[in-house]
Image (cartoon, rainbow, N blue to C red):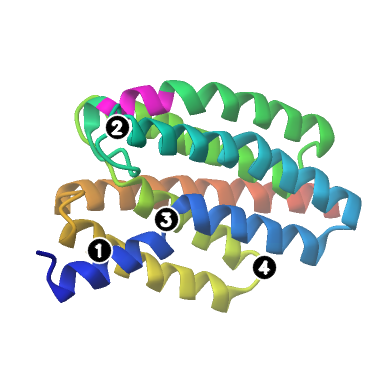
Amino acid sequence: MKTDKQKIAKIISIIGHPLLTIPLFVAIMMFAFEDTEKALLNSALIIGCIFLPLCLRMYFKSKNGTYTNFDVSDRVQRKTLFTFIIPILIVVTIISFITSPASNFSISVLFGTILVIISQFTNLFIKSSLHVSLNIYLAALAMTADLRIGIAILLLTGLIAWSRIALRRHTRKEVVFGGLIGLIISTTMLYIEGFFNELINL
């Protein structure tokens, strides 16, 4: 029987699932700062080409028992998740640079792809928390638009990290490792974006 602590942890984990937080953020940011045509294109690229196929795969694989759960918390099972999504991410990254060359959007997609690729390699010896790494990355993206929103997402990520441990989906070491990946990739991405923005403004 689930305790109140586990119930709260499950709610936080669901709210903070990258398959929910990232598409929602992308849609809001695109329609807030881009014209309608560009917003529709970029949203369709990210949500339609990455998150929708991924959600469907995870749902059906968890239903038929191939995945133990929707989060794909088993390290061995997670290998097939990476082999499915990384080729899609690479294709989407290429398309983003064709449609939005050297823009903050394309650079963000590129480093998001790099984050997942690094997570695939680290998965060979540790199952780093994608919930934590991707939401830290999301917080960094949000900070470029509004510092307060970025800080709020970062605080939420702290709760998400706790929830993953409370639900026994990750150990403390796995959560910390996910956090380090998210922090390193986010810092690098912000530096590169700042560099390109300076070049554009010269």
Circle 3: residue type = His
Whole-percent x, y for residue 137 in the image:
48, 53
| Dot 1 or dot 4, earlier in sequence | 4
| Dot 1 or dot 2, earlier in sequence | 2
Circle 4: residue type = Ala
> Mark number for residue 67?
2
Q: CA distance from mark 1 to mark 2?
A: 20 Å
Task: Tell me: residue 21, above or below residue 54.
Answer: below
Contact (CB < 8 A) between labels 4 and 2? no
Give the label, 3 or 2, closer to the camera: 2
Task: Tell me: residue 159, above or below residue 141.
Answer: below
Q: Give the magenta part as a residue range.
A: 77-82
Q: Could you say whether the residue bearing mark 1 is in a helix, strand or loop? A: helix
Q: CA distance from mark 3 to mark 2?
A: 17 Å
Circle 2: residue type = Tyr
| Dot 3 or dot 4, earlier in sequence | 3
Would residue 202 be seen by someone viewing this image from the given angle? no
Task: Tell me: residue 10, above or below residue 85.
Answer: below
3 or 23: nearer the eye?
A: 3
Residue bearing mark 1: 163
Circle 1: residue type = Ser
Residue bearing mark 4: 145
